[in-house]
Amino acid sequence: MRTRSRSVARVAAAVFPFVLAWIVMAANLGVGREFYGWWLESVPGSDLLGHFFLMGAFSFVVNYALSDRRVRVGGMRMPLGSAVVAGLVLAEEFSQIFLPRRSFSLADLAADAAGIAFFGWLAAKATASETGDAGARGVGPAA
C-alpha cells in the first residue's frame, strides 16, 4: 500500500503546480471571480485560509512524494519539498509587486508559511509511520 500511496502523491505533486499556475494566472488576469468571489467576500479570512490550505496541500504531496527527504538550508535541515514549495511561493508573492491587479501581502506569505510548515510536518509524520521511525524529524540544526 505504501508504494501505491507514494505513487498517488507523486502524480499529485506533478499535477498540483499546474492547478496552482491556473489559479495564479486567473487572478493575474482578473478572471474567475464568478466562481470563487462569493467565498472571498462572504467568509472572513477566506483568502488566508486558501493560502494556508493550498500551499499546505502542495507541501504535503511534495514532501510525501519525496519520502520526507531533507536538505540543509542556512545550517538547518528541513524537508526538501517544503524548501521547494517555499521558494515557489516567495517568487509568486513577490511577483505581485509588479502586477496591477495583484498586491503583495505579508499576511498571505505568513499563511503560506504556516501551511507549508504544518502540512510538511504532517507529511513527515505520515512517512515516519510508514517506515517505522519513532517520530517525524523536525527542522533543526544540521548534523
Image (cartoon, rainbow, N blue to C red):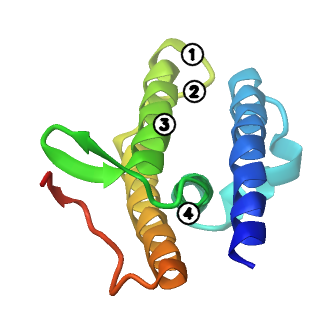
CA distance separating discs 4 and 2: 18 Å
CA distance separating discs 3 and 2: 15 Å
CA distance separating discs 4 and 1: 22 Å
Instruction: Give residue 89's mark.
Output: 3
State which tag comes first along the sequence, 4 or 1: 4
Residue at which label 4 appears? 49
Q: Disc 3 or disc 2, which is closer to the eye?
A: 3
Which amino acid does the dot numbered 3 rest on?
Answer: Val
Q: Where is residue 51 in the image (x, y as percent from the top left)?
A: 55, 53
Q: Position of residue 121 (x, y in %)?
A: 41, 69
Question: Counting other residues with Cα less than 10 Å from the Cα at mark 2, is it few (<14), some (14-19), or many (20 or more)?
Answer: some
Instruction: Give residue 139's mark.
Output: none
Using the image as rendered, state which of residue 137 and residue 100 is in the foreground: 137
Residue at which label 2 appears? 102
Extreme top residue here? 98
Callout 1–callout 2 Cβ contact below 8 Å: yes
Q: Is mark 4 on a helix, strand or loop?
A: helix
Which amino acid does the dot numbered 4 rest on?
Answer: Leu
> Above or below — where is 107 with respect to 136?
above
Q: What element carries label 3?
A: helix
Q: Quadrant of residue 143?
A: bottom left
Q: Which residue is drawn at 72% across and 32% down?
A: 21
Q: Is mark 1 on a helix, strand or loop?
A: loop
Q: Where is residue 100 in the image (x, y as percent from the top left)?
A: 59, 15
